[in-house]
Amino acid sequence: MWRLYQFPLCPFSRKVRLLLSEKGVGYELWRENPWEPSEGFWRLNAAGRTPVLEDKAKGVVLADSRAICEYFEETVDRAAMINGTAANRAEIRRLVALFDENFYGDVVAPLLHERMKKRLVLRQPPDSRVLREAMKLAHEHLEYVDWLVETRAWLAGSTMSLADLAAAAQISVADYLGGIDWTGHDEARGWYAVFKSRPSFRPLLTERMEVIQPPAHYGKVDA
Amino acid sequence: MWRLYQFPLCPFSRKVRLLLSEKGVGYELWRENPWEPSEGFWRLNAAGRTPVLEDKAKGVVLADSRAICEYFEETVDRAAMINGTAANRAEIRRLVALFDENFYGDVVAPLLHERMKKRLVLRQPPDSRVLREAMKLAHEHLEYVDWLVETRAWLAGSTMSLADLAAAAQISVADYLGGIDWTGHDEARGWYAVFKSRPSFRPLLTERMEVIQPPAHYGKVDA
């Protein structure tokens, strides 16, 4: 049995959870708070970050969300998520990096700092200037998602791919933290609503991070 | 002919250049300064970052250094760099992420800001406190490299892999910017010296970024 070291608002863990569910791979959750990584966790992953996936019986430890996704893409045929020609696969991986790096750095990382770490650890009020900037950048990223969805069935092409999972994972955390204003983003909202109704996404939408509550529309499939 | 959009001290472009050379893929260099990306460059890559690889004749544009490396690994058999079992490949990709994200974020990004951007763009002196912290973290990362090289022939296992290219690319930029003190890191230095003598690495070591000069040992293969 795989054990996934994660915390509820880690977007990279969410991407891995979506992939494992789509592929039908079972796992148990193990909570690892980013502000107090345990000594054992550093030994599992020198990068000190969630997600890490461990199978103790087999002695396998996988770290880094993209490495984990590539591993299951190579070892589990069901629900191929990095598919098509080499150019298609490069496009999928480009978009995964865009959401993992740019959307995360512009939007999710500042929201996590202001709305999670300051609340739970630093006991400080959020900086409204930082929140406004993150929401402005979220708007720009959603315009790009609107454009992708206008021109393609799914973000990277004609079929659902890891790019959709990576984007949905990041957007879902930003949405939980009140960082997404969906007004004017009908295309992106339509794509995301389809995603929210998938069985792989339901467990994520019903989870709550202690103290921090999402806005009312967050868990609703038709919102 | 592939055109690589890059600048001389971009570690991600260096990783791609090392891979293309090892695989025998020809390309031309196209300078793109990170502090003044051209309008055309944003159209090529929504993430706004080097490296981007373009083949105009074929109408192919590849962006994100890991997506680019996976593309050539899939399309060029020569010099396999993500090789072995699924677990081996996951270990290679974990280390690539460790150097691309942690080493870059801890060491190379602050060095580029203090020693390149402040010099060429902001016209400010570097902050010695930031430089000291980057060098302290470089030391810790090199201890990890020492440990890897003590236990394995190459960073990710028994053969050279993309992990070695990613590490050498990041370390070479840090070394150029005077951020590496090799004292006490004999294992890492030995591994890096082997790398420096490879034909794929020579063009990088002889290039210079205007105004900014590397320390004397930087380009020497036996130093």
Image (tube, coloured by chain):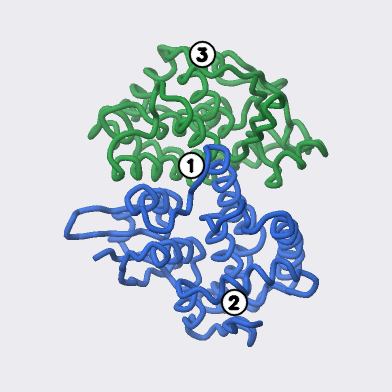
Chain colours: A green, B blue
Tags 3 and 1 on a common chain:
yes
Tags 3 and 2 on a common chain:
no
Rendered image: mark on residue A103: 1
Q: Residues within 10 Å of mark 3 (few under 14, many from 20)?
A: some
Residue B110 vs residue B97, the one in the foreground: B97
Q: Secondary structure at mark 2?
A: helix
The mark nearer the N terminus, 3 or 1, is 1
Residue B61 vs residue A172, the one in the foreground: B61
Residue B105, image x, y percentages:
62, 56
Q: On the rendered image, what quadrant is the C terminus of chain B found in?
A: bottom right
Residue lying furthest right in this view? Answer: A39
Picture residue at 33% right of the left edge, 43% below the top: A91
Question: Which residue bears the numbered disc 3?
Answer: A202
- The amino acid pointed to by label 1 is Phe
Instruction: Kindly identify which chain the residue marked by label 1 belongs to.
Output: A
- The amino acid pointed to by label 3 is Arg
Question: Which residue bears the numbered disc 2?
Answer: B176
Picture residue at 54% right of the left edge, 72% below the top: B117
Residue B113, image x, y percentages:
59, 68
Report the Cα–Cα distance between label 3 and label 1: 22 Å
Residue A212's quadrant in the figure?
Answer: top right
Q: On the rendered image, what quadrant is the N terminus of chain B found in?
A: bottom left
Q: Secondary structure at mark 3?
A: helix
Q: Secondary structure at mark 1?
A: helix
Residue A201, image x, y percentages:
49, 17
